[in-house]
């Protein structure tokens, strides 16, 4: 059984009264991965720096809230296992859920919000990605003081567990390709390889009116699966997208896939998933994303 936990690293110079939260993912084979918030100027992700960042801006300017994700080394795994932790997710395979958390953490980092030890720090980042992943509010936060934590009343598991990622970092795959490869093996390494035509692809929005699609970084796996299942027609080849109930914007679905990570349309995603789940799943597969990440 795998688990995703929130860890509480005590800050010694506060007499262990204040804590630095982080995410610890333990796989079924015992390997672990971690997510830590920190300042963009490479400070603020250790407990001591978390405290120091609360000083005047002219003494400690840490930039914006950013993120580090890595596979644990023996040393930092040992350190993580020594501190207080609580399980927020548990299941037979949490690799997709964890990478979804990585994508949202990267999305937070790309917002470039100013780092502040009291209100926008590693604890804020950890709570947000747990909240947006459909988790309950970390309970140990009441015992282990963690400045910047999200109010427990904002956690709504029933709502957020049914929603697609609130944010998804554009640089998720390029910044965390080693983690992606570590989670998904050969598929991860292939998907994380730089695409020589990446700039050209980004300049031209993907069209669903063509007879074939150019696989995105994740696309080969799902595209091949699509063909193995005997469905050679790529979802979205229709010359006209119809919605008899009139709740969807036909032009939006014709010109761009709302599930494309490069230009997501959250409103269209939500409407499509509610009104026509089967078609939503087709659009998700068409851009090489995993329907499981969207609750299918």
Image (cartoon, grey):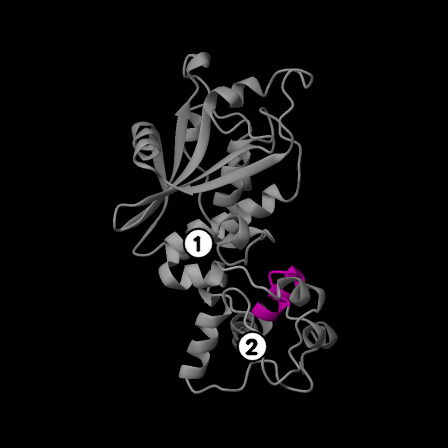
Residue at disc 2, secondary structure: helix
Q: Nearer the viewer, residue 147 or 33?
A: 33
**Inter-mark Cα distance, 1 to 2:** 27 Å
Left or right of 256? Residue 148 is left
Specify start and end residues of the magenta stretch as a single range. 258-273
Residue 161 image position (x, y, % from top left): 48, 55
| N-term mark: 1 or 2 | 1
Would you place residue 177 above or below residue 214 in this image? above
Residue 212 part of the magenta segment: no
Residue at which label 1 appears: 180
- Residue 2 visible in the shown view: yes
Residue at which label 2 appears: 279
> Residue visible at 50% across and 70% down?
219
> Residue visible at 55% across and 82% down?
234
- Residue 133 visible in the shown view: no
> Residue visible at 56% across and 70% down?
287
Q: Nearer the viewer, residue 225 or 296?
A: 225
Q: Quadrant of residue 121?
A: top right
Q: Quadrant of residue 258?
A: bottom right
Residue 100 image position (x, y, % from top left): 48, 53
Residue at disc 1, secondary structure: helix
> For the residue carrying disc 2, how many other residues have a C-alpha within 10 Å: few (<14), some (14-19), or many (20+)?
some
Would you place residue 73 above or below residue 132 in this image? above
Q: Which of 190 and 19 is in front in this view?
A: 190
């Amino acid at each position: 059984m795998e688990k995703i936990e929130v860890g509480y690293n005590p800050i010694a110079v506060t007499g262990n009264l204040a804590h630095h939260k982080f995410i610890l993912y333990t796989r079924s084979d015992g390997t672990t991965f971690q997510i830590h918030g920190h300042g963009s100027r490479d400070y603020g992700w250790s407990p001591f720096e978390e405290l120091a960042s609360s000083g005047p801006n002219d003494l400690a300017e840490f930039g914006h809230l950013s993120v580090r994700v890595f596979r644990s080394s023996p040393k930092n795994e040992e350190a993580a296992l020594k501190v207080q932790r609580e399980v927020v997710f548990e299941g037979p395979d949490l690799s997709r859920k964890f990478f979804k958390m990585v994508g949202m953490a990267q999305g937070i980092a790309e917002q470039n919000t100013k780092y502040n030890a009291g209100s926008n720090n590693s604890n804020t980042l950890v709570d947000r990605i747990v909240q947006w992943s459909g988790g309950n509010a970390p309970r140990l936060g009441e015992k282990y003081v963690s400045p910047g934590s999200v109010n427990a009343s904002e956690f709504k598991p029933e709502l957020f567990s049914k929603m697609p990622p609130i944010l998804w970092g554009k640089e998720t795959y390029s910044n965390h390709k080693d983690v992606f490869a570590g989670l998904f093996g050969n598929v991860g390494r292939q998907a994380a390889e730089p695409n020589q035509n990446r700039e050209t692809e980004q300049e031209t929005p993907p069209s669903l009116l063509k007879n074939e699609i150019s696989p995105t970084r994740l696309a080969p796996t799902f595209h091949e699966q699509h063909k193995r299942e005997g469905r050679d027609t790529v979802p979205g080849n229709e010359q006209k997208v119809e919605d008899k109930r009139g709740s969807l914007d036909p032009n939006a679905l014709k010109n761009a896939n709302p599930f494309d990570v490069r230009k997501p349309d959250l409103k269209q995603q939500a409407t499509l998933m509610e009104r026509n789940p089967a078609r939503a799943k087709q659009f998700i597969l068409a851009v090489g994303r995993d329907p499981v990440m969207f609750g299918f």
